[in-house]
Amino acid sequence: MFSLNIRFVFKVLGMMHVLESFFMLCTTGVAFYYRESDCAPLLASFAVMLGAGLIFWFIGRNSRQMYTGRREASLAVTLTWILLTFFGMLPFLFGGYIDNATDAFYEVMSGFTTTGSTVFSDVESLPHGILFWRSLTQWQGGVGMIVFTVALLPLVGGGANQLFDAETSAIMHEHFLPRVTQTAKRFFGIYLLITCMLTLLLWAGPMDLFDAVNHAMTTVSSGGISTKNDSIAHWDSPYIYYVTTVFMFVAALDFTLIYFLCRGKSKKITGNEEMHYLATFIIVATLLMTAILFFGNRDADPELLFRKVLFQVTSLITTTGYVVSDYAAWGTLFTLIALILMTVCGCAGSTSGGLKMGRFVILIKNAQNEFKKQTHPNAIIPVRMNGHVIPADTVQHVQTFVFVYALSIVAGCAVLLVDGLPLKESIGMAVAAIGNVGPALGKYAGGVFTDLSAVAKWTLSLLMLVGRLEIFTILTLFLPSFWKR
């Protein structure tokens, strides 16, 4: 028999939409400051979103005493992301900046999931308020919209833990404080601090304040949406390149590590294997491609070449998705390297998407143990990470996750192939979408997907959502057992 605490779901939806309407109002303030054409569309969108939020909250207002479990959390989180995307696309439609729902939904889903691909070929033609809204959606999606709610509006009672776990990475997840609301507040505080730091550093360079704020939000969120058509390359500044590269790396670290570093516990970072693997991937890929490109063109400026390769490698593996060079022209080898970087990605507990480096490390160590057992079949060799034994059920969970992750890529790629896209582009877009990377391969290496069909855009939108919610949260909803008592 069907049994679900639907009032709790509506209560969460109400709180999320009321909170999101506040961010929409802030965006309206930006539009009003610049006095451009987006003031009225943003204000109208704010009114619709606030009204919907109040209706949802009214329906679920008496849910506190009712039982809440994982099913309610999964449904609430999934519906939150989908409905906020629908309401978030209203400014684009009301203002006429996008003329169809498919493109508008894709653009906002790309923003909230921090994917960063876009349907706009000329973002510089957009007014400031719309540009700010695009960046703000990524900033919220980077740390998670549910995390925002739990941190700023801790009114969800006993459902806070389930909501938090349903949205954030499950692998090696550590609630380092007794209450999940405390953890969410620390995450949000760290996130805000890093964003402010980067804003000041970018503003100290050639960027003006508006561009600095926008790029700080999309860098720390591992999103990569820019206010310029040429992205970071617009400023052609070594200072901007290196500062942004450092903060892309920081955003790809587990926020728990940053929390402990702020408390003076630096050993937590220096002894973290996941971070070591991430740094190794970046260093090896950067040095290899810099050497290959330099020996292929000895007249090139070595520092410029190194800077662009380092930036692009870091952007791909952290799933930030900024594009500063046509890396599709760097040869077949870099296409393979890019595909690996777009798959493995940053650390668990960070703002980056993808498979997560922690899962990759566990897979590698488990494979090593299996080879050892071929020689010593009776040996009990646990998987260890950071000096701790990884439980067998966690290893099994990782293997299942990777299998479903790969299966999702294959399914998405199949749909894109049937839709008429070439194999390389189909693989690249499927990997980039589910990994929330943004730029793909081949002709779509720039991350601009304007000419894709509606089928392709809806497919990629679903992959983006599945990848951002760590697969199981949303795919579980399709199981008949989910809807049974």
Image (cartoon, rainbow, N blue to C red):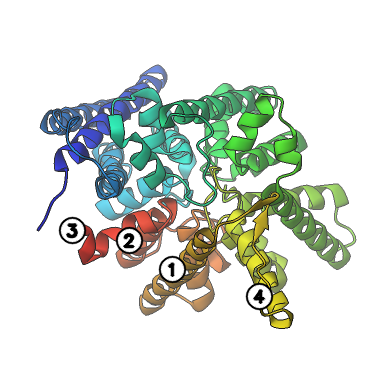
Name the side, left or right, on which 83 lies relative to 438. left
Tell me whether the residue at label 2 lies in contact with that at label 4, contact meaning CB atoms closer than 8 angstroms.
no
Asked where in the image residue 286 lies, by quadrant, the reply is bottom right
Do the CB atoms of the residues marked 1 and 4 lie less than 8 Å apart? Answer: no
Element at badge 3?
A: helix
Q: Is residue 93 left or right of residue 123?
A: left
Q: Is residue 31 visible?
A: no
Q: Are marks 1 and 2 in contact (CB under 8 Å)?
A: yes
As helix, strand or loop, the secondary structure at mark 4 comes to helix
CA–CA distance between discs 1 and 4?
A: 21 Å
The residue that appears at 37% across and 26% down in the rendered structure is: 27
Please provide percent x and percent y for residue 329. 68, 66
Q: Any mark on residue 475, and which? A: 2
Along the line of sight, the residue nearer the viewer: 290 or 340? 340
Task: Work out how far the residue at label 2 is from the one at label 3, CA to CA, in angstroms.
Answer: 13 Å
For residue 483, the mark is 3
CA distance for labels 1 and 2: 10 Å
Please give the residue where the numbered disc 1 appears in the rendered image: 404
CA neighbours of label 4 inside 10 A, class few (<14), some (14 to 19), many (20+) = some
Dot in front, 3 or 4:
4
Q: Earlier in the sequence, mark 2 or mark 3?
A: 2
Q: Which residue lies under the disc numbered 4?
A: 370
Given contact means CB atoms under 8 Å apart, are the residues at marks 3 and 4 in contact?
no
